[in-house]
Image (tube, grey):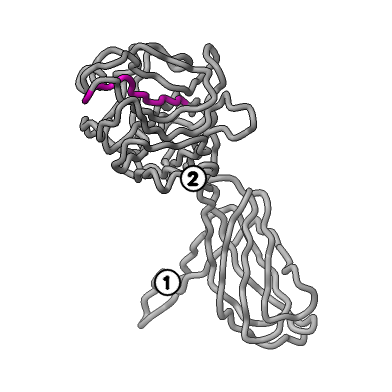
Amino acid sequence: MDFGTRFAILTKDVSQAAGVVTVTITTNESVHCWLKWTAYPIRLHLQELMTRGVFWLKDPYYCFVVWNDIEQNEPGDTLTHTFTWPDWTVCITRRYLFYGEEAGNLSPSTWGIYSYHYVPEPVEAYFYSDPGSGLVTVDGMVARTIANQTWATTHDGAGTYANPAGPAMGFSIMCGYYPNTWSHIQRAIMTFDTSSIPPGATILTARITAYGSDKLNQLGGNPGLNIFDSTPANNNNLVFADYQEFGITPLSTTIFYADLAEPGWNHWELAPAFYDRIITGGITRLAMREVTFDVANTPPPYVKLKRMHMTVFTADEGNRKYPYLKVTYLAQ
């Protein structure tokens, strides 16, 4: 029997996607290769070997059972060899080795046994609030709107307005008629049905994206918009009392007035420390608040009857510029 040339494996690369594993090797000689694999553990056998009149169990050999062959994708003898290996599911482990031929003659080269474990793949999921109220989730604005109040009363008093069906949300601050009085502070709430993320999943990234609808600053200063916790009374509606149901710890990097794209998409990446705000198997409840004045509880410069605001479109906008939450996760 004629044997082909010996060959050496120089590199090996393994990747996975959608239940298919792709293995690529390069060799120092042009050969045609096969990947031989099995789903069964490799069995180790020790043979008796006499040493100085005593039999010892050593000289191991390995039993590769119930095997399957995958031929390389490339025709003929090549230096690069690609194998497409289908039918994988999460947490399967398979063992494999390579053999080859040169010009149709089996190569005597033998190689070690490799293994591959199919790990979970990241899942990208997009979540949108429902329009209006009464469905599963909601987005919109809540506010305290009473003319000519002190800053403390406007900031800390009870809410007087809620709108779960308006086309825009964000923040707004308005001065009163009399010096150093205030008539309006607005905040935004948004909830998302993240129940499709299985409990125990590992959150890899989380991002709020919203399309800028308008901005105005007649008061000066440097207002900014960020993402916060919220604890509204309902997951699918807004009420006056929600005005005081906001956190004060920013979950992302603030987008300041000059940087808000309007029109355009704006992105708030949640910091990894706050990935626990994504409620697996339930409803995630977040908010938008102004940072420099509202969250800091410091009034902006007073200008009679003037205002500042930064707003984004809601699920009720109607032109497919809806805000959304994107989460990348690994299921357990």
Residue drawn at 55 percent across, 48 percent down? 92
**Which of the image's four quarters has the N terminus?**
bottom right
Q: What label does residue 58 carry, if any?
A: 1
Which of the two discs, 2 and 1, sits closer to the camera?
2
From the top left corner, tell me how far across and down residue 251 is, in percent: 33, 39
Residue 181 is covered by the magenta coloring: yes
Give neighbour class at mark 2: few <14, some 14-19, many 20+ (Cα, 10 Å).
Answer: some
In the image, what residue type sits under mark 2? Ala
Quadrant of the drawing holding the C terminus: top left
- Residue 162 rendering spot, x and y as whole percentages: 42, 14
Is residue 155 rendered to the left or right of residue 261?
left
In the image, what residue occupies the spot 67% across and 77% down? 80
Q: Is residue 293 above or below residue 9?
A: above
Camera-nearest residue between 286 and 141: 141
> What residue sits right under mark 2 in the picture?
261
Residue 280, quarter of picture = top left
Q: Above or below — where is 25 with respect to 105? A: above
Q: Position of residue 255 (x, y in %)?
A: 38, 44
Q: Are marks 2 and 1 in contact (CB under 8 Å)?
A: no
Seen in the image, is 254 located left or right of residue 190?
left
In this orientation, which residue lies closer to the viewer: 147 or 227?
147
Q: Residue at x 56, y 80 (%)?
A: 10
Name the foreground residue: 211 vs 22: 211
Going by the numbered disc 1, the residue's amino acid type is Lys
The secondary structure that dominates the magenta segment is strand
Q: Which residues are magenta?
A: 179-191
Q: Quadrant of residue 152?
A: top left
